[in-house]
Image (cartoon, coloured by chain):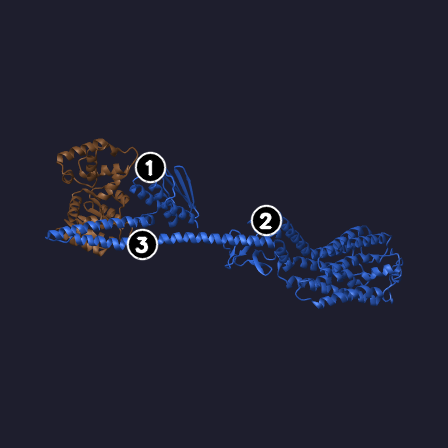
Amino acid sequence: MRVVIADDAVLMREGLARLLRDAGVEVSSTVSDVDALYHRVRLDRPDVAIVDIRMPPTHTQEGLVAAERLREEHPDLAVLVLSNHIETRYALELLEGHPERLGYLLKERVSDVAVLVDSLTRLSEGECVIDPTIVAQLLSRRRRADPLERLTARERDVLALMAEGRSNTGIADVLVLTPRTVETHVRNIFAKLGLQEAAANHRRVLAVLQFLRS
Amino acid sequence: LLIGFACVAAGFVVHVSLGDRAYVIAGIRSADLPLEVVLVLLAVAGAVLIESALQRRLVFAAAIAFLVEELASPAAPTGYVFALGLAATGLAWGFLGVALVTLPGRRRAPWIWLTALTAGAVTAGPIAAATWMPDRHGCADCPVNALAVLDSPRWSDGFARWGAIAMVVAAAAVALGSLVGRRSFHVLPELGAAVALSIGVTISLLPRIRGGVDTVPSPTARLLADLSLAVGALALALPDVQRARRRAAIRGLATRLAAAPAPGRLGAEVARAVGDPTLAVAFPTTGGALVDEEGLPVHQPGREATRIVREGRHLATVFHAAGTFANDDEVASLTRVAGLALEHERARAEQKAQARELRGSRRRLVEASDRERRRLEHDLHDGAQQRLVSLLLAVGSTRTADKATKTALSGVEGHLQAAISELRTLTHGLFPSVLANEGLAAAIEDLELSSTAIVEILELPTEPAPLVVESTAYLAAAVAVASATSSVQLRIRSTPDTVVVEARGVTASDSLEWRALRERIDALEGQLVTSVDEIRVELPCAS
């Protein structure tokens, strides 16, 4: 798997690159601004671009704009957006429409190399990755006539992990359940939330997100 | 007294002149005499209205002399009356001319014209009359000229002619001097008087220049001369009439001010009183600035300004059109009448200016604190937080086979994660970066997404507002959401002038957060209206 890293902070950029190289991921180049990012992506043809959300010149949401443009120009490219802030709105904006091959993680999450590599792998396979903190925040929101209240505690756990973009097998590993039990939970969730079960994994995330957003 | 005297003189003239006349000195027809009397009385009225004593007397004398000319008629009861009429011929123009030349406020008295006028009038009038006896030269009905010292038509014609020439030239020179000597529009009345003098003297005396002492103007010319005299006298009186009206208005102002000095209306009252709608009153503050009635700074570059000073203290500066005040006396009378009110108004204006300044400085303090919080947020985010994340990466990429080290590293990792998370909460509490980057609407959406209460957003602002207003509106919404019991409905409206935050399902308390919010709203001159289960915050955008 080939990766390009864009972050204006050199410590972060190089630290991340070393971490990934140690884990056997090919880091083809590291850049400090979006123009260099566009250039390197065209040249290196990476599987995943890791993009800091705040970059020069304004340090506001250059990374978001870059992510959207990269996805338009390179439909096969997966983009992982990194942020220091819990910017739920950005995450939702990014994922609205086409959440496949798109991830949004808080920066401190990447220190666990196993989680990072797992996320990169799932992204390049067409899934969607959302930081658990953001999922937790969305789930903790209360709303009028909350359909989530009809879910059991276990089903909520499964939904949260689904929202993070995990496959049934992944969920089974985390919750120490058999995949068959997880499948049952997922079916129940879809039934209770009135959603059609879709084939692709990212459809599940999309469904969950759209539901959370409603 | 003057009018009475003029009326008696007029009556006398009419009585004398209505007799059967074959010989006419002044030139008027009997039928036109009442009209002449009316015109001369108009000139007398003008004289009465003139303020300067010398001018008043001279113009009055001119009017009387003009009437007295008519006494040189065959109907005159005695030779002395007849002689008086003869001697008065042309004197009226001399008086009027001298009145004009000696007007107060003329920069330099043109003594040469003064001399020419006086000498001409004396020569053409009394001296010419003293050398001629009309009863011997064609007017058999005329009484004997009691003034005559000798009888020589040649001498009297010469005196009459050269005296008249001197007066016509001098009058023309005075008129010309008024025309070119002063550029200001405000001497128009003076110019009018000078032109009237010039026309009148020419009409009256031209026949004598041509034909000698007993040649009179035609009846129409005599009436025109009457008219010139009246116009000249009234024109001289006009500036004084205007001044008198202004003084009366200022007295009226005194009455109105005494009745009800409405605060903030003084400038308009003064403008009305002196008849200058462009007039503006500005008050000096102790800081040396000029402010209006509301305490706002006044800039009137290039306008005529008059300082109102009372007892050595600068009370106000009045900006006005050129010529609103004719002289210092008028300013002094305004000061007398309105001084006290101006002093009150000045104190009020200064108070308002100070309050305005205070409000401005409170707002600037809030802005400064916001700026400082933003800077801190930025520094913490770009500095400490980045470093912690890098450290976390370094720890994460450290490989070790030693189990104890591994456990220790994992502990360090946990602490670092916690530190980063705490720092994030701290920086967000300092100043939500989304507010500065994307505005109030986005920040409120974030608030809704991160809140644990049920937040319903009914309306979001569409107009951008100054950052300090947006941050205060955000704080109001955040405090409202944080103190909501179960669910809160937010409605945030913005216009170019105000931002309004309404929250339903919220009851304001006296907690620290609410107190801080109240202070901020106060500093921005906003309003917080609370009722059971509802709050409303209104923030003006302008400082």
Give the letter of the chain under mark 2.
B
| Mark 1 and mark 2: Cα distance apart in space | 54 Å
Horizontal arrangement in the rendering, residue A208 relative to residue B107 (left or right): left
Query: Sequence order check: which comes first, mark 2 or mark 3?
Result: 2
Hue used for the chain lettered B: blue
Task: Examine the rendered structure and indicate whether residue A60 appears above or below residue B449.
Answer: below
What's the residue type where badge 2 is placed?
Pro
Q: Around disc 1, counting alpha carbons within 10 Å, would you say few (fewer than 14), some (14 to 19), or many (20 or more)?
A: some
Real-space Cα distance between discs 2 and 3? 53 Å
* Residue B261: mark: 2
The total of numbered circles placed on residues is 3
Task: State the SS at label 2.
Answer: loop
The quarter of the displayed image where residue B456 is located: top left
Q: Residue at x 22, y 43 (%)?
A: A132
* Res. A198 image quadrant: top left
- Viewer-proximal residue among B414 and B182: B414
**Which chain is brown in the picture?**
A
Mark 1 or mark 3: whose residue is earlier in sequence: 3
Q: Residues within 10 Å of mark 3 (few under 14, many from 20)?
A: some
Where's residue B110, x and y in %? 69, 67
In the structure shown, which secondary structural element does the residue marked by tag 1 occupy?
strand
Q: Which residue is mark 3?
A: B376
Q: Chain of mark 1?
A: B
Look at mark 1 in the image and give the residue it sits on. Answer: B487
Q: Position of residue B22 (x, y in %)?
A: 86, 55
